[in-house]
Amino acid sequence: MSSKQGDVMDQAYQKDSSMPLDTMAEKKKVRKGLFALESIAVLFAIIFFGIPFYFVIINSMKDSAAAAELSLAWPETFQFLANYKEVLMLNDGIVIRAFINSSIITVSSITVIILICSMAGFILSRRQGMAKRLNYVILVGLMIPPTIVPTIWVLQNLGLFKTFPGIISLESALHFSFACLLYTAFVATIPRELDEAALMDGCGPINLFFKIIFPLLKPVTSTVIVLSSIQIYNDFENMLYFFPGAENATVQLTLYNFTGIYGTSYHLLFADVILISIPPLVLFIFFNKKIVDGMTAGAVKG
Amino acid sequence: MNSSTRNMYPLAFLIPAALVYCTFFLFPTSMAFFYSMTWWTLDDWEFIWFENFIQFFQEPSLRIGFRNTLIYAFTTMGGKVVLGLILAVFLCSKIRNKDFLRSIVFFPALLSTIAVGFTFSAMMHPTNGVINKTLALVGIDGPNWLGDAKIALLSVAMTDIWKGVGIATVIFIAGIMAIPTHYYEALKIDGGNAIQSFFHITLPLSRPALNTVVILALIGGLRTFDLVWAMTGGGPGFSTDLLASIVYKQYASGFFGLATAGNVLLFLFVGLIAFPIFKLLNRKEVDL
């Protein structure tokens, strides 16, 4: 589904740029206008989207007093290494521990999500009647936020509150609807004849799914990996509600170490902002197209 | 479907997903309806009917959440739709640096909301902040963005728009790119101009994209918690308290029944607003 959409987009680009213009004069005029428009656009993009980034980066390299001025000025003394080292060393490396915790939660949740959602998506796509009956039950998960106290109550009764298995199960439950709908839609594009051929060859349902269907689901699996990992890594709300405790630090909560009633250490805060933004940046550089395709899936057909 | 194909798709494959989804989402969500009518301490509960809901509507510090959430959700949705559409039309035109511009607009969507919130609160600082210093250069005395109860909510909403407009833009771009180019060619032959092409082709035919953006932005806005929490913590006073932040505050102060009632009201709110709009948008869809 997503790669098809990409092709359509590419074709549209090409068609668009090869459209002939009537006369040379008109061409020149249009070009001049476009150039002005482009310059303005780039300028606006730099002002509105570039300045916040520049602001954070530059202030993460200043000393405490200079960063507290919150200005865009070039730093007089660079404290690049010192600031970042201080952030990483704070409280016996709580930021490093947070990175480890967040990685454990993200990787485990995604593994669970992929496994349970691909299996569910396969069955729901092949058994249309079932899918129709469950449609609203699944859609509810996309719309409604989790309840705080009843969820804590369930986790506590299962002995999972403030534990890794607890937060991992919860993140999996909260990402189920989105991933399941993506898988269900994609399985529909795999011909049923494949299942029948496998059946003829004496393949059972478990072999059929894990050896034949699951490898074919790779495009969706990679979309789910990229999108869910960004969401779970950036999750602040659920970590705050369901994974509290000093030793349970996760990356988003580490930012609160640098703000407080005695004032904010802006140089360290911004250094931490940069540190925790590195993983999404790396994903963005490598999977730009995948992320955009995943987020726009369904936009064309509604 | 004969019995052998039925055996190929065993319902047992649904069990792991059903177990996780029901235990950790559906079950607590349905229990919320019961516990919202109790005085609750996790160990013990006492049934008090609708008292929590009545309290929610009576106390001004709780009631304000409905108004703020509505304003917030519709402001951010409007901003994302309008700006996203303008940016998308622009990025679909024949300009260079298209990919660069699209990336720079989209990237904030991947950043941590808390990090963005802290950064913008620093930039919106009343005296030292970058925004007010820039405004001072042209002689404007900038307001206290987050400290003035009248505009604090809008300042948070603007930050949300900054962060979320990239998603709206890429969705609109996908929608616009799916419009067959022969419509534009036909319009050109008939002598139509750019404005006509926008209102008669681009806008009606990117309807599915518009629906997606409206629904995503509305639902996201109605359940927002983290941005408000990072930027203002609900203040000054209760002027930026949204339903989700009120629920959290009640939970943190130990009013579990009241917090759960707030959660139930939040679902009903999301359902009552998002669902009719979803139906309405889908009905008006243009057939090709």
Image (cartoon, rainbow, N blue to C red):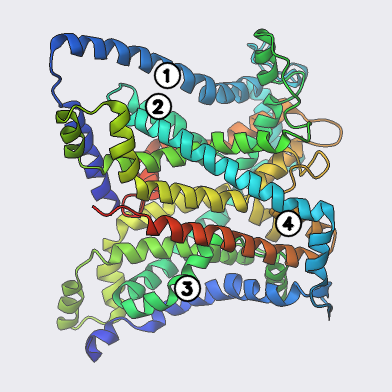
Residue for badge 4:
A244
> Element type at marker 4?
loop
Of marks 4 and 2, the one in the foreground = 2
Residue for badge 2:
B101
Residues at badges 1 and 3 in contact (C-beta under 8 Å)? no
Amino acid type shown at disc 2? Leu
Q: What distance separates the C-alpha of mark 2 from that of mark 3?
A: 40 Å
Same chain, marks 2 and 1?
A: no
Q: What distance separates the C-alpha of mark 2 from that of mark 1?
A: 7 Å
Up/down of B11 relative to B228, above or below: below
Residue for badge 3:
B17
Amino acid type shown at disc 4? Pro
Up/down of B162 relative to A253, above or below: above
Residue for badge 1:
A42
Residues at badges 2 and 1 in contact (C-beta under 8 Å)? yes
Up/down of A207 relative to A66, above or below: below
